[in-house]
Image (cartoon, grey):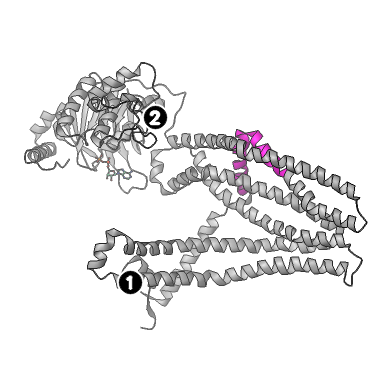
Amino acid sequence: MSTIEKDNENLSDGAAEEVKTKKEIRAEKRAKLKKEKEEKKKKRLPLRRNIDNNIFALAQVWGTSKSYFIIYYLMTFLNAPLEFLLYTYLIRLIVDSVEGVGWSIDAIFAYIFIVGGAAILIWIVSNYYWNAISGIYSEKINHALRRKLYKKATEVDLACYETPEFYDKYVKAMDETQERVRKVMQTLDNLIWNIITLAMTSFLIFTIDPFLIVFALIPLLLGFVRRKANVLNHDQNSERKPINRKFSYVRRTFYLGEYSKEMRMGSFFPRQLQMLAEVRKNYNDLTKKYGPKLAICDFIKNFGLEAVTVLGATLYAVWRTIGDGQGGMTMGDCLIVLNSISSISYALSTMVQYLAEFNEHALYIEDVRYFLAYEPTIKEDPTAPEATRGDIEFKNVHFKYEGAEKESLKGINFRIADGERIALVGRNGSGKTTLVKLLLRLYDPTEGEVTLNGKSAKDYRLSSWRALFGSVFQDFKLFSLSVKENVLHRLPREGDDEAVTEALKESGAWSKIETLEHGIESTMTREFDDEGVNLSIGEQQKVSLARIFAEKTPVVVLDEPSSALDPIAEHKMFENMIKATEGRSVIFISHRLSSAVLADRVYMMEDGEIIEEGTHHELMEKNGKYAEMFHLQAKNYTSGGEDNG
Ligand code: ADP
């Protein structure tokens, strides 16, 4: 039994405790470490790409507003030397003057007036610029970025939403872009400031005693230690997150009302205490793992910076001024050295920090670039011919969702003749919505094709193809815009009001909308408008249905349009729909088979295939699955039960 021990790590997941040999545990740990290392490696970008990505961010600013870009850095180019002249070089002038080897007092006063005056002038201008003007410029840049990103967001294939890796990049791009571009500008600004300060101070020190530069260069080496410490801190924080989550979960069970009954009636307390003990152990393990390494980094960093650089340079300067090396340095030079050496070492060590920041920015911008460079497979070709109404046909269409194991559509063949009304019926998950998504070209078939008047859907211009259809989905979304805009799905034009009102009457929403103070101009939801309206889900569905009545598209597609309506409203809606869509093709999915009676042709789907087709009467006569489902629903209705469509 000595080679067997419990795997404590699994306790936290509440999983069954596994029993493993020590050898297995060691192998697992090694594999985990290897994986972590590989993942970190994957995160690193080649230097070229690193620079490219940062330039890409800067180019976004330059491309949108050159004047903002120039003024942003011009301030630094002016401010950094002035600060040096005012705080560092002035000391030298004063001390040299006191020692009688420098300028006259009048010249120093003139220097202070000129340099100080210039500094004050620039401060006033930059203060006004940063507070009153730069916000407008940066919004201009943000706006340009958002336009690019959001336009892309409406173009990417829906399949992308099913690819976690792409989706991750997409969300990050949306969340991060603005902030990252700002950060790249800021890091470059800090770097420029550092370089100017360094160049001027180093030159000054070099003119005093070239050997002093050796002390100043030490922090450059220590910058790598600083970087290592950053990486360690970052890793430690990442590993702390799951422990924090566990801790916050246990805490919640103690203070949230929703757990209070179970906590009192059961004996959870000892189990929760056990979890708290695990949390403590996990935190301690982290400290043991990272603490010593961080301590070493800190020691080297501080020892190098404080002891070697600052104290070393100070000792050397004092030695050259009043010690055995007396005469090598004036009192003024000595003071300059004491004053400058720490700012040089600080500037050098933070320089490495800024390079690490560029590296981090590059990783985020990589995601943004990946997203922006994404070429959708279903895309607009302005040279392709316009789609016009006609017969639509599915020819041996197969479809499998990204990452799914099995096909959602298998060899679908069916035809929607121009002006025909079609009902798609079948149990949940049989493939009806997927078929509709392919019809609208939200997805393209993985095999087979959809045609219009004998020509593949892919050969028509995408926007004209989609414009053929007026559609309402079961999971419809209304926007925080006016009722009118929600009906039209576009910017309103003059003379739209009447059509919108008529459409709302036909969809059954008018009785509610006419009671609103602002009628069809009312804003949906109160999110941005205190006078906005919150409608019930049934009323919302009626508003979204009005779309098919307002726009006379050649084809109407309804995916469970009546799911939130009561049976009376549903019946009325279908009656109106039949009237309003006279001469137009209609494809509707309804889980209540009573509405399928209205269709010219019914297609019954099961497991991604069409298993029965015909008119309602033909299918009832056939007495197959459709008839069975119809009878079952009729029975449920009369006995007040749920339908099962
Ligand atoms: P219905 O509209 O008849 O209820 P769907 O067309 O929504 O059926 O679904 C058909 C099949 O495709 C189901 O097995 C469902 O789980 C699967 N499916 C639907 N959407 C996705 C998706 N985005 N990713 C993977 N599988 C999906």
**Which residue is depicted at the point 41% across and 25% down?**
461
Asked if residue 590 is positioned above or below residue 391 in the image, the reply reads below
Q: Can see residue 27?
A: yes
Name the N-terminal-most of marks 2 and 1. Answer: 1
Crowding at dot 1, Cα within 10 Å, few <14 / some 14-19 / many 20+, comes out as some
Q: On the picture, is 173 further left or further right than 639?
A: right
Dominant secondary structure (helix, strand or loop) of the stretch shown in magenta: helix
Q: Which mark is residue 550?
A: none
**Residue farthest top in this picture:** 495
Q: Quadrant of residue 324?
A: bottom right
Relative depth, front residue between 301 and 386: 301
Q: On the picture, is 272 further left or further right than 306?
A: left
* Number of marks present in the image shown: 2
The quarter of the rendered structure image containing the C terminus is top left
Residue at the spot of label 2: 458
Q: Which mark is residue 17?
A: 1
Q: Amino acid at mark 2?
A: Lys
Asked if residue 583 is positioned above or below residue 290 in the image, the reply reads above
- Write the start and end of the magenta stretch as one range: 49-77
